[in-house]
Image: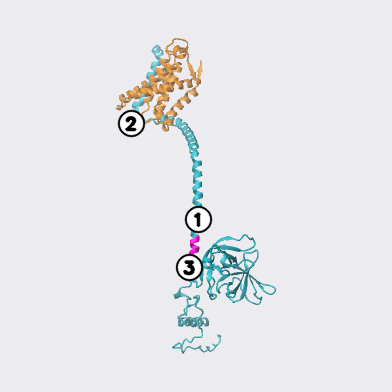
Chain colours: A orange, B cyan
Amino acid sequence: MNDYVEGFPEVGRKKERIFKFKALAIVAIALAAIVFQVAVPRFVSYLSYLDLPLLVTVYFSVMRRSPIAGVLFGASIGLAQDSLSRGYLGMYGIVKTLVGYFAASVSQRFDVENSMVRFVLGFFFYFFHQFFYWVLKRALLGESVDFDLEQTLVVAVLNAVVAVPLFRTLDRLKITS
Amino acid sequence: MELLLNRYRNLTVLLLAILAQLVLLAYQVKSNGEVRLIRVWAVTAVTPLARMVEASRSSVSHFFSDYFVLLDVREENKRLKGDLDRVSMDNHDLRTELDTADRAQALVIFTQHSPSKYVAAHIIGNTTDSGAKVVYVDRGSSSGVKKGMAVETPAGIVGKVVNVYGPVASMVLLITDSNFAAGVISQNHRVHGTLKGDEGRSIVKIDDVQNEQTVDADEWFYTSGEDGIFPKGLPVGQVTTVRAGKARKEIYLAPSGLQNGLEEVLIIIEGVHAPIPDMPAANQPVQLLAPPADSAMPAPVPAQAGPMSDADRVIDKYRRIGDAQKHVYGDRGTGAPDYNINLNAKSPEAAKPAAPAAPKPPNP
């Protein structure tokens, strides 16, 4: 039987495992994700829809299974992303803080090593991230920006498609405890 | 309180984190400023990696672009080389045509100014005999060419027709051939001699000149007309070597007619004798212009005050002689004035050699 049948949903030994990573690996992966978003869209414009920092935040949060760790991951990566943008510091920070917290909370209830679960997590948190960012922009900054639902859904699917192989690749860095 | 915090630790941390960032956000919005420290850290951390990524991308991109571009470069290079070869050949052909046109024009000008009658001919080949200095020209009996006619260029004589092969071809024996001979005369001292080719060399020699006769180095020789082939007055060449021999002088000439190569020649159909020119031949190495007529020889003006020296008086006398005969000192081809003219005479008939001046007392 494959992972898709066994892992969604499941109360068992798998969802209780906590995966640790080397600090250097976490920093390097986070930095690589931010550099990717800064450098790659310059010559491959359609890759600008890919939010690697968000996917990395989701991954480390779900694998660490600790909301505090998720908060710290999200805040750090979000503030770094804010630092390299023209917006105010804290916009992406707040949103990714929430993403990290909720991703870690979800990981305590589901088997996050399942590919289908990862796909759904990727889709859901990307949509949540874009929606909440739009809310902050309108509520806190008073900017009248539109929320393109259809485009957000499509891009969310794309990010979810990328998330599955990305998470598989990052699984090689984990230290099983 | 502590139990509350421990129980809701995760939520507390979340709220604290969000609160801190809200404060940060509010500060930036309120003060309309930015928190540079965090941005500097982030940029400092990201910039080196971004540079590495960009460098890698550009090198890979250039590699692939150069690879694919090179596929066309070879074909383009081949095409350009072919174009270059074709253009070089066209350029060479055009230059040859231009040179031919220049030579043809020079021949036309020369024939127009010469009293002899010529027919122009092209050198079309050499003989297969390695020792002979013989060429073929593209003129024959149909152009009036006959055996024994002289052949020259504007620069000098080059040979004579020894055979006529039909209407369109003739054989010309060059002056450098050992079988060639012609009568010549020197320009300065009017020394007669016989021009002969020197076997195996591209120079000519003058025979039959006695050691007692004077021949200067760089002196020009012209045809004397005594051989019945070459009209008198055609340039032959300039002396390169002259030395005394056992009984006769050894004189070698550089033939002027062969110095610029041999492409087009003139066959003398009807020759007219011309005097030996006093001035050097036309192809002298240095072009000198005649001095201006109004300031040919600036005569020294005698001093306004004070006595004139003997030299001043002589110079003044010669100046007055030149003025009386409208002679310009230094003008080529006009000769010298008559220094015996009587400057005090009223008419040309009364002009007679002036009496020699009384000797002046020597200066103390």
What segment is highlighted magenta in the picture? B99-110
Which of pointers 3 and 2 lies earlier in the amino acid sequence?
2
**Cα separation between marks 3 and 1:** 24 Å
| Mark earlier in primary sequence (3, 1) | 1
Look at label 3 and name its amino acid. Answer: Ile
Which labelled disc corresponds to residue B93?
A: 1
Pointer 2 indicates a residue of which chain?
Answer: B
Would you call the spot at circle 1 few (<14 residues within 10 Å), some (14-19), or many (20 or more)? Answer: few
Q: Is residue A8 magenta?
A: no
Q: Which of these two is toward me, B325 or A71? A: B325
Disc 2 is placed on an element classified as: loop
Q: Amino acid at mark 1?
A: Asp
Tell me which label, 2 or 1, sits earlier in the chain: 2
Q: In the depicted view, which residue is nearer to us: B251 or B288?
A: B251
Question: On the image, which quarter does residue B363 sit in?
Answer: bottom right
Q: Which residue is mark 3?
A: B109
In the rendered structure, the answer to whether residue B278 lies left or right of residue A53 reads right
Residue B257 position within the rendered picture, expressed as x and y whole percent measured from the top left: 56, 66
Q: Amino acid at mark 2?
A: Asn
Up/down of B255 relative to B211, above or below: above
- Tell me the CA gap for discs 2 and 1: 78 Å
